[in-house]
């Protein structure tokens, strides 16, 4: 495979500058970036495309996942790999969504960004981008990854775990795909091989999926208030430990059962960063299995949410969505 790497700028701190209200996307970022990289030798050839309105990724909507994927797919055959510059706040959500939309990718897609803007002193932007470029230009795999700090992680295994560290992302249930120091140590055996393209172009309804964190005092009324929305078709329940919720709370299981009965796909993801849901390890979790709640194994919250969104946008039948949700599609669960 030959050709240059495409760098797609979507926004984020990497391309921001100070304003009276704090950091905002800066005009003319592309020109600044091109100048900064012009003198660096040894990088693969690349083209830079900027979305018309780079955003603070805190403003990301699911529809933007379709925009980003479409920008990549439209140019797929012209590039050997892709780097997506993205804000860190929702980078793991976007990387997860892209992994489910670009299944069977035959070239790498690497998301990166920065904790400190490119135009500020001590920025981590250039080191992150340069390594992401080198990885996107050299890896032969079907990974949608996040390169940040010193590690390449599988995107749908990643989570932003520090708001201040240069190593902002971690992958609590899966090993790093590469550790970068003086040498670039790639764990080739972990990389998803290049596949046969099975790309999806979902039309997302932003109200289709919600997240509910179980907490002491959670009531049936609170569950009803969330699940009564007719647009809601999927719910990520963030449960305690191995997948438990308070079954002594009157009506809580019934409220969830009503949602499942009306076709809402409810999935059970633990609040713990590390380890899987084992629904049924405790009686407090077994009730969820009885009413048809699907365990999310050891998926990240971001991955469970994005997977549910993509599946609901591409399949009408809740039973089919439940089956596919429980199936590993692109390395998102152990
Ligand atoms: N708020 C920024 C964003 O997500 C943070 C960052 O990029 O680090 O766009």
Image (cartoon, grey):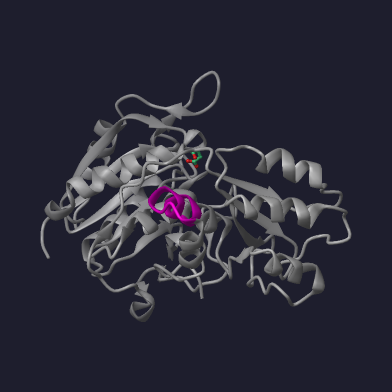
Residue at 38% in and 44% down: 65
Does residue 172 appear left or right of residue 88 in this picture?
Answer: right
Does residue 10 appear left or right of residue 82 in this picture?
Answer: right
Viewer-nearest residue: 170 or 116: 170
Tally of numbered discs: 0
Residue at 29% in and 26% down: 28
Residue 39 visible in image: no
Q: Furthest residue to the top?
A: 20
Residue at 29% in and 66% down: 142
Does residue 148 appear left or right of residue 257 in this picture?
Answer: left
Quadrant position of residue 70: top left
Quadrant position of residue 241: bottom right
Q: Position of residue 310 (x, y in %)?
A: 42, 52
Q: Furthest residue to the front?
A: 261
Q: Position of residue 149 (x, y in %)?
A: 46, 57
Quarter holding the N terminus is bottom left
Q: Position of residue 298 (x, y in %)?
A: 58, 69
Residue 200 visible in image: yes
Residue at 77% in and 42% down: 222
Confirm whether the magenta stretch covers residue 309. Answer: yes
Q: Furthest residue to the bottom?
A: 189
> In the rendered structure, which segment of residues is drawn in magenta?
307-317
Is residue 189 shown above or below 32? below
Quadrant position of residue 226: top right
Viewer-nearest residue: 221 or 183: 221
Viewer-nearest residue: 292 or 168: 292
The majority secondary structure of the magenta stretch comes to: helix
Is residue 288 shown above or below 226? below
Q: Position of residue 184 (x, y in %)?
A: 34, 70
């Amino acid at each position: 495979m030959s050709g240059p790497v495409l760098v797609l700028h979507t926004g984020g701190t990497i391309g921001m500058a100070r304003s009276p209200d704090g950091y905002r996307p800066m005009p003319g970022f592309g020109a600044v970036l091109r100048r900064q990289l012009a003198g660096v030798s040894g990088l693969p050839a690349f083209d830079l495309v900027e979305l018309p309105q780079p955003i603070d990724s805190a403003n990301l909507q699911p529809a933007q996942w379709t925009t980003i994927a479409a920008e990549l797919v439209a140019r797929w055959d012209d590039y050997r790999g892709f780097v997506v510059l993205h804000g860190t706040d929702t980078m793991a959500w976007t990387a997860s969504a892209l992994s489910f939309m670009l299944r069977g990718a035959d070239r790498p897609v690497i998301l990166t960004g920065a904790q400190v803007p490119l135009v500020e002193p001590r920025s981590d932007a250039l080191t992150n981008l340069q390594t992401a470029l080198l990885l996107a230009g050299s890896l032969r795999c079907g990974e949608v990854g996040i390169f940040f700090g010193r590690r390449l992680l599988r995107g749908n295994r990643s989570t932003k775990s520090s708001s201040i560290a240069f190593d902002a992302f971690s992958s609590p249930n899966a090993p790093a795909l590469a550790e970068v120091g003086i040498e670039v140590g790639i764990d080739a055996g972990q990389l998803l091989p290049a596949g046969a393209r099975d790309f999806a172009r979902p039309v997302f309804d932003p109200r289709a999926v919600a997240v509910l964190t179980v907490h002491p005092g959670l009531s049936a009324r609170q569950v009803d208030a969330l699940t009564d929305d007719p647009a809601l078709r999927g719910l990520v329940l963030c449960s305690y430990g191995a997948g438990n919720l308070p079954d002594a709370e009157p009506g809580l299981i019934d409220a969830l059962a009503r949602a499942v009965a009306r076709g809402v796909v409810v999935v059970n993801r633990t609040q713990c960063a590390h380890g899987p849901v084992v629904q049924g390890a405790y009686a407090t979790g077994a009730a969820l299995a009885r009413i048809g709640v699907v365990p999310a194994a050891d998926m990240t919250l971001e991955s469970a949410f994005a997977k549910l969104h993509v599946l609901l946008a591409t399949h009408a039948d809740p039973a089919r969505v439940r089956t596919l949700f429980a199936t590993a599609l692109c390395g998102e669960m152990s």
